[in-house]
Image (tube, rainbow, N blue to C red):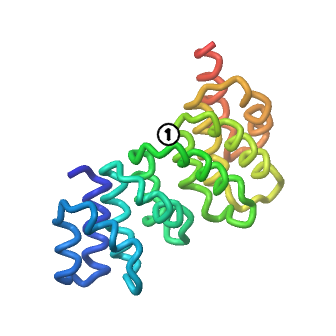
Protein backbone atom coordinates (compact mmCIF):
# COMPACT_ATOMS: atom_id res chain seq x y z
CA UNK A 1 0.00 0.00 0.00
CA UNK A 2 1.44 3.39 -0.99
CA UNK A 3 1.50 6.45 1.29
CA UNK A 4 -1.57 8.14 -0.23
CA UNK A 5 -3.65 4.96 0.13
CA UNK A 6 -2.45 4.46 3.69
CA UNK A 7 -3.27 8.06 4.62
CA UNK A 8 -6.75 7.81 3.11
CA UNK A 9 -7.58 4.50 4.78
CA UNK A 10 -6.43 5.70 8.18
CA UNK A 11 -8.37 8.97 7.87
CA UNK A 12 -11.55 7.26 6.69
CA UNK A 13 -11.28 4.49 9.29
CA UNK A 14 -11.29 7.20 11.98
CA UNK A 15 -14.13 9.06 10.26
CA UNK A 16 -16.25 5.91 10.01
CA UNK A 17 -15.54 4.83 13.57
CA UNK A 18 -14.10 1.57 12.22
CA UNK A 19 -17.56 0.19 11.47
CA UNK A 20 -18.03 -3.24 9.89
CA UNK A 21 -19.28 -1.46 6.74
CA UNK A 22 -15.96 0.38 6.47
CA UNK A 23 -13.99 -2.84 6.94
CA UNK A 24 -16.07 -4.60 4.27
CA UNK A 25 -15.66 -1.76 1.74
CA UNK A 26 -11.94 -1.51 2.45
CA UNK A 27 -11.42 -5.24 1.96
CA UNK A 28 -13.70 -6.20 -0.93
CA UNK A 29 -12.33 -6.79 -4.39
CA UNK A 30 -15.80 -6.67 -5.95
CA UNK A 31 -15.87 -3.52 -8.08
CA UNK A 32 -19.61 -3.82 -8.68
CA UNK A 33 -20.22 -3.77 -4.93
CA UNK A 34 -18.05 -0.67 -4.62
CA UNK A 35 -19.80 1.06 -7.53
CA UNK A 36 -23.20 0.38 -5.97
CA UNK A 37 -22.20 2.53 -2.99
CA UNK A 38 -21.72 5.53 -5.30
CA UNK A 39 -25.37 5.47 -6.36
CA UNK A 40 -27.00 4.18 -3.18
CA UNK A 41 -29.11 6.63 -1.21
CA UNK A 42 -27.97 7.75 2.24
CA UNK A 43 -24.32 6.69 2.05
CA UNK A 44 -21.97 8.71 4.28
CA UNK A 45 -19.30 10.83 2.63
CA UNK A 46 -16.50 8.63 3.96
CA UNK A 47 -18.03 5.59 2.21
CA UNK A 48 -18.42 7.40 -1.11
CA UNK A 49 -14.87 8.69 -0.89
CA UNK A 50 -13.45 5.27 -0.05
CA UNK A 51 -15.18 3.48 -2.92
CA UNK A 52 -14.46 6.28 -5.44
CA UNK A 53 -10.78 6.17 -4.49
CA UNK A 54 -10.61 2.39 -4.76
CA UNK A 55 -12.48 2.36 -8.08
CA UNK A 56 -10.22 5.12 -9.40
CA UNK A 57 -7.08 3.19 -8.55
CA UNK A 58 -8.62 0.15 -10.26
CA UNK A 59 -9.20 2.20 -13.43
CA UNK A 60 -12.98 1.92 -13.14
CA UNK A 61 -14.47 5.00 -14.79
CA UNK A 62 -17.67 4.78 -12.75
CA UNK A 63 -15.68 6.68 -10.11
CA UNK A 64 -15.08 9.72 -12.32
CA UNK A 65 -17.98 11.96 -11.25
CA UNK A 66 -17.54 11.23 -7.55
CA UNK A 67 -13.80 11.90 -7.76
CA UNK A 68 -14.33 15.21 -9.55
CA UNK A 69 -16.77 16.29 -6.84
CA UNK A 70 -14.21 15.35 -4.20
CA UNK A 71 -11.47 17.20 -6.09
CA UNK A 72 -13.52 20.36 -5.55
CA UNK A 73 -14.30 19.67 -1.87
CA UNK A 74 -13.52 22.20 0.87
CA UNK A 75 -11.49 19.61 2.80
CA UNK A 76 -7.89 19.47 1.42
CA UNK A 77 -7.24 15.79 2.31
CA UNK A 78 -10.32 14.79 0.28
CA UNK A 79 -9.08 16.90 -2.65
CA UNK A 80 -5.62 15.35 -2.45
CA UNK A 81 -6.98 11.80 -2.43
CA UNK A 82 -9.31 12.55 -5.33
CA UNK A 83 -6.46 14.07 -7.36
CA UNK A 84 -4.32 11.01 -6.68
CA UNK A 85 -7.05 8.63 -7.82
CA UNK A 86 -7.97 10.75 -10.86
CA UNK A 87 -4.35 10.79 -12.00
CA UNK A 88 -4.42 6.98 -12.03
CA UNK A 89 -7.96 6.52 -13.38
CA UNK A 90 -7.03 7.06 -17.00
CA UNK A 91 -10.29 8.79 -17.91
CA UNK A 92 -9.89 11.21 -20.85
CA UNK A 93 -12.34 13.65 -19.20
CA UNK A 94 -10.05 14.22 -16.24
CA UNK A 95 -7.89 17.02 -17.65
CA UNK A 96 -10.90 18.97 -18.91
CA UNK A 97 -12.59 18.70 -15.50
CA UNK A 98 -9.41 19.70 -13.64
CA UNK A 99 -8.94 22.68 -15.99
CA UNK A 100 -12.51 23.81 -15.38
CA UNK A 101 -12.03 23.61 -11.61
CA UNK A 102 -8.63 25.32 -11.68
CA UNK A 103 -9.92 28.27 -13.71
CA UNK A 104 -13.23 28.77 -11.88
CA UNK A 105 -12.76 32.07 -10.04
CA UNK A 106 -15.75 31.33 -7.80
CA UNK A 107 -13.95 28.25 -6.47
CA UNK A 108 -10.36 29.50 -6.49
CA UNK A 109 -9.98 28.73 -2.80
CA UNK A 110 -10.21 25.05 -3.76
CA UNK A 111 -8.06 25.21 -6.92
CA UNK A 112 -4.78 23.94 -5.46
CA UNK A 113 -5.35 20.24 -6.10
CA UNK A 114 -6.82 20.70 -9.60
CA UNK A 115 -3.71 22.77 -10.44
CA UNK A 116 -1.39 20.06 -9.08
CA UNK A 117 -3.33 17.42 -11.01
CA UNK A 118 -3.02 19.37 -14.26
CA UNK A 119 0.75 19.49 -13.90
CA UNK A 120 0.85 15.76 -13.24
CA UNK A 121 -1.42 14.88 -16.17
CA UNK A 122 0.60 16.81 -18.78
CA UNK A 123 -2.54 17.01 -20.92
CA UNK A 124 -3.19 19.53 -23.71
CA UNK A 125 -5.47 21.44 -21.32
CA UNK A 126 -2.79 21.76 -18.65
CA UNK A 127 -0.66 24.68 -19.86
CA UNK A 128 -3.52 26.99 -20.93
CA UNK A 129 -5.39 26.39 -17.67
CA UNK A 130 -2.29 26.98 -15.53
CA UNK A 131 -1.45 30.16 -17.43
CA UNK A 132 -5.01 31.48 -16.98
CA UNK A 133 -5.07 30.62 -13.29
CA UNK A 134 -1.64 32.13 -12.62
CA UNK A 135 -2.39 35.34 -14.52
CA UNK A 136 -5.44 35.89 -12.28
CA UNK A 137 -3.34 35.30 -9.16
CA UNK A 138 -0.84 38.01 -10.08
CA UNK A 139 -3.10 40.86 -9.01
CA UNK A 140 -1.91 42.83 -5.97
CA UNK A 141 -2.88 41.35 -2.61
CA UNK A 142 -4.29 38.14 -4.08
CA UNK A 143 -4.82 35.79 -1.11
CA UNK A 144 -4.25 32.57 -3.07
CA UNK A 145 -0.44 32.46 -3.17
CA UNK A 146 -0.32 28.67 -2.74
CA UNK A 147 -2.39 28.30 -5.92
CA UNK A 148 -0.13 30.78 -7.74
CA UNK A 149 3.00 28.97 -6.57
CA UNK A 150 1.58 25.62 -7.68
CA UNK A 151 0.87 27.15 -11.12
CA UNK A 152 4.43 28.48 -11.41
CA UNK A 153 5.92 25.14 -10.40
CA UNK A 154 3.54 23.22 -12.67
CA UNK A 155 4.40 25.41 -15.65
CA UNK A 156 8.08 24.80 -14.96
CA UNK A 157 7.47 21.06 -14.83
CA UNK A 158 5.55 21.16 -18.11
CA UNK A 159 8.30 23.21 -19.77
CA UNK A 160 6.07 24.81 -22.40
CA UNK A 161 7.36 28.04 -23.95
CA UNK A 162 3.83 29.53 -23.93
CA UNK A 163 4.31 30.03 -20.19
CA UNK A 164 7.24 32.43 -20.51
CA UNK A 165 5.24 35.70 -20.50
CA UNK A 166 3.23 34.88 -17.38
CA UNK A 167 6.30 33.48 -15.62
CA UNK A 168 8.17 36.70 -16.42
CA UNK A 169 5.27 38.61 -14.81
CA UNK A 170 5.52 36.33 -11.75
CA UNK A 171 9.14 37.45 -11.26
CA UNK A 172 7.80 40.75 -9.88
CA UNK A 173 6.06 38.96 -6.99
CA UNK A 174 8.45 38.16 -4.11
CA UNK A 175 6.52 35.05 -3.06
CA UNK A 176 6.77 33.63 -6.58
CA UNK A 177 10.06 35.01 -7.91
CA UNK A 178 12.37 32.16 -6.92
CA UNK A 179 10.02 29.50 -8.30
CA UNK A 180 9.52 31.56 -11.48
CA UNK A 181 13.29 31.74 -12.03
CA UNK A 182 13.52 27.94 -11.70
CA UNK A 183 10.53 27.44 -14.02
CA UNK A 184 11.98 29.73 -16.68
CA UNK A 185 15.33 27.94 -16.43
CA UNK A 186 13.61 24.57 -16.97
CA UNK A 187 11.82 25.92 -20.03
CA UNK A 188 15.11 27.22 -21.44
CA UNK A 189 16.80 23.83 -20.90
CA UNK A 190 14.01 21.96 -22.66
CA UNK A 191 14.29 23.96 -25.90
Q: Residue at x 72, y 48 (%)?
A: 133
Residue 154 image-quadrant placement? top right
User: Circle 1 is placed at which residue position?
Assistant: 120
Q: Residue at x 75, y 61 (%)?
A: 105
Relative to 61, residue 168 above or below: above
Residue 55 location (% of width, % of height)? 33, 58
Q: Residue at x 53, y 48 (%)?
A: 94
Q: Left or right of 62: which side holds 115?
A: right
Taking depth in this image into account, of 64 and 53 the one nearest to the observer is 64
Relative to 60, residue 123 above or below: above
Taking depth in this image into account, of 64 and 184 the one nearest to the observer is 64
Relative to 68, residue 132 above or below: above
Report the residue that reaches farthest toward the bottom.
42
Q: How many marks?
A: 1
Residue 65 location (% of width, % of height)? 50, 62
Taking depth in this image into account, of 37 and 27 the one nearest to the observer is 37
Q: Left or right of 142: which side holds 93?
A: left
Residue 134 location (% of width, % of height)? 72, 46
Relative to 186, residue 131 above or below: below
Residue 34 image-quadrant placement? bottom left
Give the position of the C terminus as an image quadrant: top right
* Callout 1 secondary element: helix
Taking depth in this image into account, of 24 and 178 the one nearest to the observer is 24
Amino acid sequence: MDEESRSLTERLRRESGGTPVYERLAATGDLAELADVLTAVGQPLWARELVAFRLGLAGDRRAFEALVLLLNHRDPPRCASAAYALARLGDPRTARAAAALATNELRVAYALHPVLLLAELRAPESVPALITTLRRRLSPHDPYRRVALACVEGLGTLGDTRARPVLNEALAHPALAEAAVRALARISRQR
